[in-house]
Image (cartoon, helix red, strand yellow):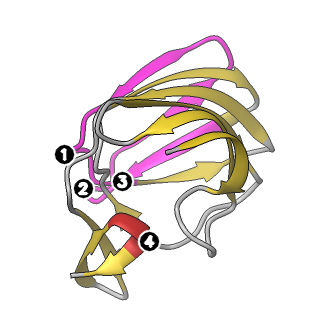
C-alpha cells in the first residue's frame, strides 16, 4: 500500500512519474501521471484495467500491429489488461488514472523477447 507517494511508474527506464494518491493493489489505485516527452522501446500490457483522463498534452499509443491512436487533453481512455502497447508522449503530458485490482503477472517485450513480470517488476 502507498499513499501520497511519488515514484517511477513503469520501471526506472520509464519516462513516466507517478504521483500516487492511493495504491492498494488488491483493490484499486488513483495516480496522477506525468509522461515526459518521448517513449521507451518496451511494448507491454498491464496487471490492471485502467481508466485514464488526459489532462494536458498528448500521447500516441502504438500497438504491435502497427496501428496507432493519439490521445489528447479532455479525452477519456479505457485500457484493458490485455492491451499490449507502448505510449509515446508527444509533449510533456499529464493524466489522471484510476486503476482496478492487480493480477499477479503482466508482460513486456524486450528486444523482441517476451518477459513475464510480477510485483516489483521482478521477472518470473
Q: Earlier in the sequence, mark 4 or mark 1?
A: 4
Q: Earlier in the sequence, mark 2 or mark 1?
A: 2
Residue 78 among magenta residues: yes
Q: Earlier in the sequence, mark 2 or mark 3?
A: 2
- Numbered disc in front, either 1 or 3: 1
Residue 46 among magenta residues: no
For the residues labelled 4 and 2, the Cα–Cα distance comes to 14 Å
The crowd level at tag 1 (other Cα within 10 Å; few <14, some 14-19, many 20+) is some
C-beta proximity under 8 Å, tags 3 and 4? no
Q: Earlier in the sequence, mark 3 or mark 4?
A: 4
The residue under the point 80% across, 44% down is 92
The residue labelled by disc 2 is 65
Helix, strand or loop at mark 1: loop
The crowd level at tag 4 (other Cα within 10 Å; few <14, some 14-19, many 20+) is some
For the residues labelled 3 and 4, the Cα–Cα distance comes to 8 Å
The residue labelled by disc 3 is 85
The residue under the point 49% across, 45% down is 1
Helix, strand or loop at mark 4: loop
Q: Position of residue 87 (x, y in %)?
A: 52, 51
Classify residue 25 by image quadrant. Answer: top left
Q: Position of residue 102 (x, y in %)?
A: 28, 44
Q: Position of residue 42 (x, y in %)?
A: 44, 71
Height in image: 34 above or below 116?
above
- Numbered disc in front, either 2 or 1: 1
Classify residue 116 by image quadrant. Answer: bottom left
C-beta proximity under 8 Å, tags 4 and 1? no
The residue labelled by disc 1 is 82
- Numbered disc in front, either 2 or 3: 3
Q: Most extreme residue toward the top, as rendered?
A: 74
The residue labelled by disc 4 is 42
Query: Quick one: 1 or 117, which is closer to the camera?
Result: 1
Taking 78 as reference, is 83 left or right?
left
Amino acid at each position: 500500500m502507498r499513499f501520497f507517494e511519488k515514484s517511477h511508474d513503469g520501471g526506472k527506464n520509464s519516462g513516466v512519474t507517478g504521483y500516487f494518491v492511493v495504491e492498494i493493489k488488491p483493490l484499486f489505485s488513483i495516480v496522477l501521471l506525468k509522461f515526459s516527452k518521448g517513449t521507451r522501446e518496451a511494448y507491454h500490457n498491464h496487471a490492471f484495467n485502467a481508466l485514464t483522463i488526459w489532462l494536458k498534452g498528448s500521447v500516441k499509443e502504438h500497438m504491435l500491429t502497427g496501428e496507432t491512436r493519439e490521445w489528447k487533453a479532455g479525452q477519456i481512455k479505457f485500457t484493458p489488461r490485455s492491451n499490449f502497447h507502448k505510449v509515446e508522449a508527444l509533449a510533456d503530458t499529464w493524466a489522471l488514472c484510476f486503476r482496478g485490482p492487480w493480477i499477479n503477472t503482466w508482460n513486456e517485450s524486450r528486444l523482441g523477447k517476451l518477459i513475464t513480470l510480477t510485483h516489483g517488476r521482478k521477472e518470473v
